[in-house]
Amino acid sequence: MEIKEELEATIKPLTDKVKELEGKLEEYKAKDITRKVPGDIEVKVVKDAGDQPFSSLGEQLMAVKEFTTSHGTKVDARLKITGAGEQIPADGGFLVQTDFATTLLEKTFASSGIISRCFRIPISANANSIKIPAVADSNRGDGYRSGGILAYWKGEGAQKSATVPSFAQVALELKKLTGLTYCTDELLEDASALEAWIGRAFASEFDFKIADAIINGDGTVMPLGILNSPCLVTVTAETGQGASTIVAENIIKMWASRFGPNSSNYVWLINQNIEPQLYTMGLAVGAGGGPVYMPVGGLSVAPYATLMGRPVIPCEQAAALGTAGDIILADLSQYVIIDKGSVQAASSIHIKFDYDETAFRFVYRCDGQPLWANYLTPYKGTTSYQSPFVVLNGTRT
């Protein structure tokens, strides 16, 4: 009995301490509690702070606003502090919650008529480049197809002939697209309005810049664009064709320069200024003819917005009327984009502190280029070339 009583006397204080800690844990879960940490900073402990993220981007930005208006004395425990010091938020900024940053990028891709059609490859967290194996195939003639594979018809008992294919690589290395915007304290007071504004502004601008790089990029600090790609095929204008015009023969020749097996993937990317050319474009047939883009019912009927059965997409990034790139026939599945799969986003109150504005920074690391290293010489009819990307010559006189 003495041993039992001695053990009970030893265990009871420990049991009581466990019950006390369990009671405090339930108290923390039941309500928000403000606690002091070194540096006289009040940290707001929320229910299940370790597991419960912000419910919306607006809610997180409101927490940043509270930190700002309290001059750094109140900080929500769910805010991730970055910078020189762990206990002093003023040394750095606040990371935007990962799922919110990912959602912003998804909005960018979903809202775009161009980048959503590209071949996207997310790469691993520890990589900043990728090399994609590709077949060295720029000629459909015998001995060139599929990098040099050639099959032979042989008679019975004849020796087989061997061929050795050659391969190429598409190398991409991450570039950096950045965005920096400011929100006033007044806007920060309304979480739902703020989230809607940030989401719309970010998606719109990143869509514009990525699409512009896909079409016009020079391949240095940005992706390599279609118009600067060595696989681009340029169709010559018709003899005597007027300056800054597009005629039906241009469309027919551009369509004939596509890579035929992928016909269902193509879209027409146009500068909106060329639409009057399309609506008035006609094709002569004998002594007559008729419009080739206008619907049968004329202007009173909704336009089909297709050429050769493929969608016509107006985009600001296409060149001005009369310039190469004002109309582009593109199979965007043959344009590859690599990225880290999310956006790095952070906020800071310091850049425009005296204006009562909070800065929000977004960084998207990506790269892109056509999968084709060169245009294709067809098996027969070698006077023309084929490509997933075709434009009309800018010289039209």
Image: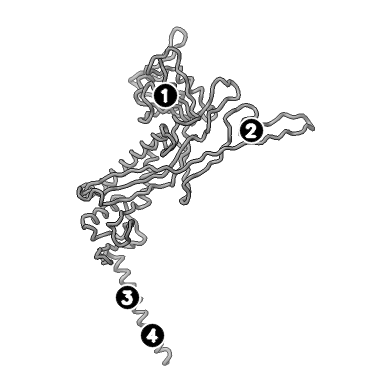
Q: Is the Cβ of the residue at disc 2 closer than 8 Å to that at disc 3?
A: no
**Contact between labelled residues 4 and 2, with CB atoms less than 8 Å apart:** no
Single out the mark in the foreground, 1 or 3: 1
**Image location (x, y in percent) of residue 340:** 44, 47
Secondary structure of the residue carrying tag 1 is loop
Side (left or right) of 206 relative to 117 = left
Mark 1 residue type = Ala
Tell me the residue that label 3 is attached to.
Answer: 20
11 or 314, nearer to the observer: 314
Residue at x 31% of width, y 57% of height: 79
Residue 275 x/y as whole percent: 36, 22
Q: Left or right? Give the position of 346 relative to 233.
A: left
Give the number of the disc on residue 10: 4
Q: Residue 324 carries which label?
A: 1
Q: How far apart are marks 2 and 3 (CA)?
A: 77 Å
> Nearer the N terminus, badge 2 or badge 4?
4
| Residue 94 visible within the image | yes
Q: How crowded is mark 3: few (under 14 residues within 10 Å), some or many (20 or more)?
A: few
Q: Residue 148 carries which label?
A: 2
Mark 2 or mark 1, which is nearer the start of the sequence?
Answer: 2
Q: In this view, does 85 lie above or below 310?
A: below
Q: Distance between the residues labelled 1 and 4?
A: 88 Å
Q: Position of residue 224 (x, y in %)?
A: 45, 35
Q: Is residue 297 in view? A: no
